[in-house]
Amino acid sequence: MATDPRKRVPPKSMPETAQSEIDHVLASGLGDFSLRELLGLMLSNLGLAERRAYLARMVGDKGNGFYDRSLSLGSIPVDVRVPRTRSGEFRPALLPDRYERGYAEESQTLLLSLLASSRSVNAAKIALKKMGLSTSEEDLDAVAAGLVEELDLRNTRPLEADLLALFIDGKYIEVRDGDRLRPCCLYLVVGLGRDGKKRVLSCLTRFGRENLEDWKLILRGLVERGLRRVMVVVQDDFSGLLPITRGLFPQADVQLCIVHMHRNAKSHLSKSDAAEFKQRLRTIKAAWTEEVGAAQFEDLCQRFAERYPTFMAELRKKREHYLAFLKYPESVRRSLSTTNAVEAVNGQLEILRRNSGGYFQSEDVLKLKVSMAITSLESGKWRRKAAAIEAALDQFNALFAARYETES
């Protein structure tokens, strides 16, 4: 159905009772109603319900009909009948600010939601056409291009010289390539700044399995972009990665992810032994001091050394890297013991992957969805400092200054 931006919802379709009007629409079918008319109807009835609630509180005031107002919900023109009162004191909260005719943020929200739920940009364009919003296709292209461009900039823009922490991890995903699915690795680096906020510093996608050469490229790139001093690097025990991070950041502590260690233990130990291992590991994570934690870690290794000598010998060799988090204030130990900062990005991406049918339609679509996941975190949850980080931020920065103040 064509949508005429000058067409209005007829006054007779706006009875005083909102429910009866909605029942009328549902009974007649939605085929005769454009999206604009439905939005106008909903906004008008919300205003009406708001006026009823207002009059129930303000006994001396009375309803005084409606006035028509043309608004814009993003790129959608909407005609609304705004209820008023005799006193003139009532104004529906759903209206945009005075002297403004549109809901600018809703347009961006609509386009981002379409991109998040669609398998590709073309699928989102088709959805816009079906809604009679083909004029928004150019806006959609601009939003998608901006997100991909921002992702590329993350791998090149200059970095702060100092960071409190660096979290690195890889994630396996599948990307459609012609008529088959190809495995792809997403390399992610998240930084914790001295201001206590997390930011994605680098995000690189590569076809194939996770490999050391890609990590060398990414980590050396961080140094070339200006990163110099880091307090702690948190990573998993990917083969060969530990010597590289120690070489690039020689004064930083390297923390091997406790969660990854537990997963490895489950594959090496029997089910009952793995359960006991997990319980002992919890005790170590709650240790008061690094010395107490080291003693408990040795007890854990001794407990299983006879049955699993090779695995326990490997853990003993890397003890200092599994327990590095115990050097830091108690409130931040949990944050520094795992790569969960990276997992937060992976969690957002996993939602988008499921919405895309279990895989990504192309490498470009993958970049788009990754950028959306990162943007969602940085404009939402990561916009503020985590409470645990904020509580220990001064102490954390003092430890940073003490370690590097003697640097020549």
Image: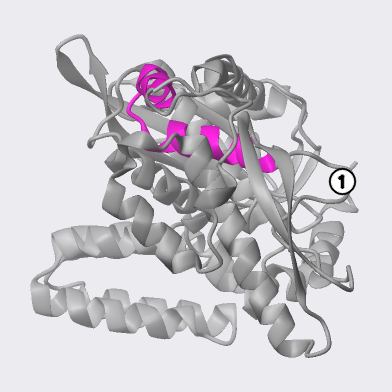
Residue in the image at 24% along x and 58% along y: 264
- What crowding class fits label 1: few (fewer than 14 Cα within 10 Å), some (14-19), or many (20 or more)? few
Q: Compare residues 86 and 97 and report the one nearer the observer.
A: 86
Q: Which residue is mark 1?
A: 407
What is the span of residues highlighted in magenta in the rendered image?
A: 105-129
**Hey, which quadrant is residue 20 in on the image?**
bottom left
Residue in the image at 35% along x and 61% along y: 23
Q: Compare residues 45 and 283 and report the one nearer the observer.
A: 45
Q: Residue 395, relative to residue 203: is it above or below?
A: below
Amino acid bearing label 1: Glu
**Hey, which quadrant is residue 79 in on the image?**
top right
Measuring from the top left, give residue 303's x and y in whole percent: 23, 81
Measuring from the top left, give residue 170's x and y in whole percent: 40, 38
Q: Is residue 371 a member of the stretch shown in magenta?
A: no
Residue sitting at the far front: 12
Measuring from the top left, give residue 24's x and y in whole percent: 36, 56
Q: Residue 396, relative to residue 11: is it above or below?
A: below
